[in-house]
Amino acid sequence: LDAVFISHFHPDHFGDAFNLVVARYVGDVYEGAKPKGPLLFFGPRTLEERFKTWRTLCWPEPNDHYPLTFFEGIVTHTVGPFRIETFPVKHVPWFESVGIRVIVGAKGLGYPGDIGSSHDFASLVETTRNADLFMIETGYPHRTPNHWTLEQTEELMEAAKIKQVLLVHLRHMADEEERVKAFAEARPYVIVAEDRMVVEV
């Protein structure tokens, strides 16, 4: 694992990211291994500051260190064969959110994290145009300032000519799951995400 992406600071989206640092550090201590290089974190501004605050609270050993590099806000960076591009996302007003595009060769993947229905649609079309795979949280029955609907997803797929969509971050409510699954079953280019799923792009 070379890089971690955090779209925003709600705990269901980054609650375990910093624990990963401790787990890797402890694993290396017991295995006698050394990090091959810094673990890269991509996310909104204030990401590094939040990590340092968390470390003060939850990782009291003062001399422990694990190499990390933070890329905050809107950035472009290369990780191995992958070109990483982040873009602004409108989700909630009290902190920034970012989405990510991963490009390798002629293939492209996009993921905005949680996205509000008030996000500028035209800019999202340009950001996701011709994506081979687009991961999107969707399923809300109506538009809300902070979340997305199935109807918006379909509109985006058509406007941006997205080849395949992976529906993620579903709420486990019977009526919502049924609606989302029915939506996907009627469209061969839409997949409902499941744990441990592998999607070939």
Image (cartoon, grey):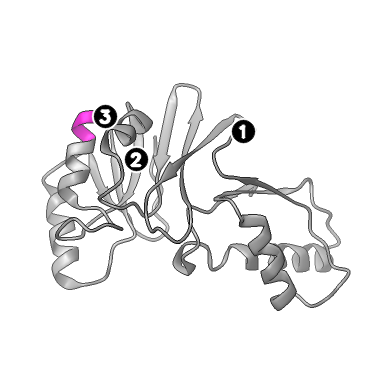
57 lies above or below 136: below
Are the two marked residues, 2 and 1, in contact with CB atoms closer than 8 angstroms? no
Q: CA distance from mark 1 to mark 3?
A: 24 Å
- Give the crowd class for mark 2: few <14, some 14-19, many >=20 residues within 10 Å: many
Magenta part of the chain: 157-161
Mark nearest the camera among 2 and 1 is 1
Residue 30's x, y, as percent?
Answer: 82, 69
114 lies above or below 53: above
> Which residue type does callout 1 highlight?
His
- Element at label 2: strand
> Which residue type does callout 3 highlight?
Ala
Relative horizontal placement of residue 165, taking residue 27 as reference (left or right): left
Name the dominant secondary structure of the magenta segment. Answer: helix
Relative horizontal placement of residue 176, taking residue 29 as reference (left or right): left
Q: Disc 2 marks which residue?
A: 134
Mark nearest the camera among 3 and 2 is 3
Q: Disc 1 marks which residue?
A: 77
- Element at label 3: helix
